[in-house]
Image (cartoon, rainbow, N blue to C red):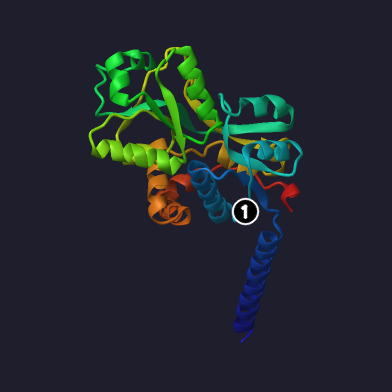
Amino acid sequence: MMTYLLRTRTLCAWLVGALLLNTAMTVQADTQKPVVIGWVNWADAEITTKLATTILEDQLKQPVKLIQADIGIQFQALANGKLDMIPMAWLTYSHKPFWDQYHDRLEDLGVLYEGRLGLAVPTTVPISEVASIEDLNKPEVRAKLGGKILTSQVGNGQYMSATRAIEQYKLDGYKLVASSETGMLNELDRNLKRDKWSLINAWSPHWMFSTWSLRYLDDPKEVYGKTEQIHAVARKGFTHDYPQVAHFFARFSIPVKDLEDMMKHARESSADQVVAEYYAAHKGTYQAMFEASPPVSTAQH
């Protein structure tokens, strides 16, 4: 009888301990301070941000709050401490002015993937005829392209780069034909179906490269710059406050081909769906990023 009572008490004590531990963990998760992540309404930024959010919420049980705004506002909010981090800073060229302005109040968490801007043509255009931007000056090439450079959004960074390319390469007889991104790519698609040449003011990662076979033209004057690196950038003090999250972003990366495929499939379903499917297929890879992760900071509570 005494043995039975001892066993019963031991079991009850174990159950109470387990219940208290579970309750403590639940309270900790409920009171954990959310990471405020900013993102811009770009297809690659949406996929990257939502994938990172899914990973953090599943692996660390870390609450995340997403804030959408223009990139200039995002950098200003980081510098003012109103935003914790952003995962789409093109620091090599495009967003370097923002970094230069605020860098003393920011942290660079690492490179997530690479991107590029430039003039592109379908691979059906022979490279022997058009290999670089300089080749666009050939009369026969200009005639086949109709002197048109298809572009989107008058006044954005890519549009201004194309304007500089026309000036620096002396592309006489060419004009920028601007429309929406959809309009630009619809024109590309129509031309391909008619076996007509097209010249696109392109950028990557973008789903256009998963939809059509395209190649960039060489840019010896580097009007468009070289390969861009897209970084995760945080407010100063973020690594101290969220060491595990910073540890993750220092290791987080997405193959550009995977990113472009997800962007393409998201057009047919949704970003949320493709992110969920991609995470399920690569969960083990992302789980390994949290091995030897630093301890949680008390600043998160």
Residue 223 visible in the shown view? no
Residue at 74 percent of width and 44 percent of height: 82
Percent of width and height locating residue 229: 52, 28
Q: Name the image quarter holding residue 6.
A: bottom right
Percent of width and height locating residue 92: 56, 24
Q: Compared with residue 136, is residue 273 higher up or lower down, i.e. above or below?
A: below
In the foreground, 237 or 7: 237
Percent of width and height locating residue 101: 71, 26
State left or right for residue 237 relative to residue 177: right
Q: Compared with residue 219, is residue 106 higher up or lower down, i.e. above or below?
A: below
In the foreground, 40 or 111: 40
Q: Secondary structure at mark 1?
A: loop
State left or right for residue 201 relative to residue 126: right
Q: Residues within 10 Å of mark 1 (few under 14, many from 20)?
A: many
Residue at 36 percent of width and 42 percent of height: 186
Q: Compared with residue 31, is residue 14 higher up or lower down, i.e. above or below?
A: below
Q: Quadrant of the N terminus?
A: bottom right
Which residue was labeled with disc 1? 62
Residue at 58 percent of width and 43 percent of height: 40
Q: Residue furthest bottom?
A: 1
Residue 169 visible in the shown view? yes
